Image (cartoon, rainbow, N blue to C red):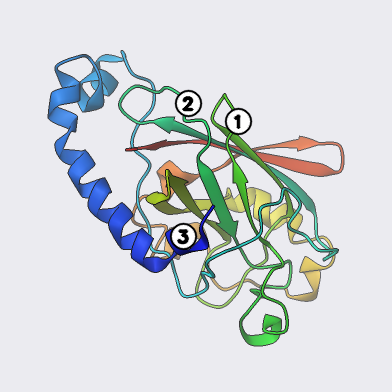
Amino acid sequence: MDEAKLTRRGSLAGMAGFLLGLAGWKAAASEGAGPAGVASGAVSCVLTPEQTEGPYYIAGEKYRRDVTEGRSGVPLLLRLRVVDASTCKPIAGAAVDIWHADALGVYSGFGAGRRSRTFMRGIQKTDANGLARFRTVYPGWYQGRTVHIHVKVHVAGNVVHTGQLYFPDSLTDRVFRRRPYSRRPHRTTRNASDFVFANGGRRSMLSVRKSGSSYVGAITMGVNR
């Protein structure tokens, strides 16, 4: 994929498409889709809330499943499904772009992580079922934010969703009692006091289960393509 299509200009174009897509809800509702379909139970997915990109985005990340680059942390397997919010049909070939802090709260390309621009960053394309898979570690915390993962979804070179994914606080508490997280006790911000989580975070919570020594985090993201 042309990296130029994954730039902030593309992000602005995608946001414009998102706003236009909202206008399309009325037409979709007449066919049993959109908000009316959700209310009636005919449609089981909803539009995923947009959230800020934040200051740590780097365009042109690597296409790869494993983003850990050997960094320590509790293994986390992400299962991110992309569907059309109006029809719930999976979107194949969407590029799902993730980035997050490592176990010690460091982002690649910035501050203590400035020597590398790639750890905990990557892109995967969705399969025929709309599913993108990543192998990473449970994110650490940094001042002022609850634990989260950033995500962008690109369809046909356009950004159709920019958001953040979250974890239950009770699970994070358990994980953070383990090393290397326990080297940094007393995280400062939980979900309820996070200014970004307050705007749609509950609808962006990962469903997390234990699988051996790893956790599996899953979510279905409804987007306007």
Amino acid type, callout 2: Pro
Q: Which residue matches tag 1?
A: 127
Q: Which residue matches tag 2?
A: 90
Asked if residue 58 lies left or right of residue 71, the reply is left
Asked if residue 114 lies left or right of residue 56, the reply is right
Residue lying furthest front in this view? 2
Q: Residue at x 25, y 21 (%)?
A: 39
Residues under labels 3 and 2: Cα distance? 21 Å
Amino acid type, callout 3: Leu
Q: Which residue matches tag 3?
A: 6
Q: Residue at x 33, y 55 (%)?
A: 199
Rate crowding at label 2 as few (under 14), some (14 to 19) or many (20 or more) other CA atoms within 10 Å: many
Amino acid type, callout 1: Asp
Q: Quadrant of residue 12?
A: bottom left
Above or below for 143 versus 47: below
Asked if residue 134 lies left or right of residue 205, the reply is right
Residue 109, numbered circle: none
Q: Position of residue 218 (x, y in %)?
A: 60, 37
**Which circle's residue, 1 or 2, is located before the other in the chain?**
2
Q: Position of residue 215 (x, y in %)?
A: 75, 42
Rate crowding at label 1 as few (under 14), some (14 to 19) or many (20 or more) other CA atoms within 10 Å: some
Q: Residue at x 63, y 79 (%)?
A: 109
Instruction: Name the quadrant of the C terminus.
Output: top left
Residue closer to the observer: 183 or 51: 51
Callout 1: SS: loop
Judged by depth in the image, the label closer to the viewer, 3 or 2, is 3
**Which circle's residue, 3 or 2, is located before the other in the chain?**
3
